[in-house]
Image: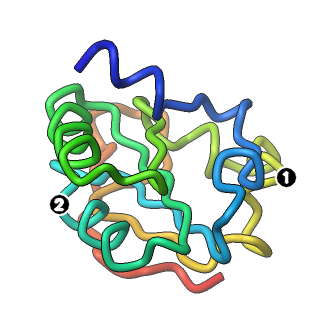
Amino acid sequence: MTDFLPTVSVMPGQIDLRLLFPEAQRFALEVGFGGGEHLAEQARRNPDTGYIGCEPFENGVAKLLTQVQASRLRNVRVVPDDARDILVGCRMPRSLSCSCCSRIRGRSFAITSDASSRRVRSTRSIGC
């Protein structure tokens, strides 16, 4: 798995959606993907959508990588960290603004720097 992660991981400052997904018609961001079941299933069902998943926990990243590799999903990239650098204020990369994301989905997240209050339950999609 350690050999596969570098082929699909991106860091927030390096996100250029057109370079990552040259054939994608739409883009989606999933924050806090857990074990990645939903993200992998959506990627299988929608091969013309480029998916970026953010997850700070290694076990979740490893589970998603297993699914991406087994299904040979070419439309998934992983930010193996939390999503604060992408979601907070002006630090959002221009290439990942709401004008180009067709869907942003949060599974279990909050935008805060206080680790003790970091998790807020939310399964709603944020309309962009």
- Secondary structure of the residue carrying tag 2 is helix
Which quadrant: the C terminus? bottom right
- Determine the residue positioned at 48% across, 30% down: 9
- Determine the residue positioned at 42% across, 77% down: 46
48 to 88, vertically: above or below = below
Q: Nearer the viewer, residue 66 or 62?
A: 66
- Secondary structure of the residue carrying tag 1 is helix
Q: Amino acid at mark 2?
A: Glu
Q: Amino acid at mark 1?
A: Arg
- Determine the residue positioned at 62% across, 51% down: 87
Locate residue 11 relative to residue 64 in the image: left or right.
Answer: right
Residue 97: image quadrant is: bottom right
Q: Nearer the viewer, residue 28 or 70?
A: 70
Locate residue 86 relative to residue 95 in the image: left or right.
Answer: left
Which quadrant: the N terminus? top left
Q: Nearer the viewer, residue 68 or 97?
A: 68
Q: Position of residue 48 (x, y in %)?
A: 54, 74
Locate residue 70 relative to residue 9 in the image: left or right.
Answer: left
Q: Which residue is tagged 2? A: 37
Say the numbered circle drawn on residue 94.
1
Camera-near label (2 vs 1) is 2
Q: Position of residue 110 (x, y in %)?
A: 41, 54
Circle 1 packing at 10 Å, graded few (<14), some (14-19), many (20+), is some
Say whether marks 2 and 1 touch (CB < 8 Å): no
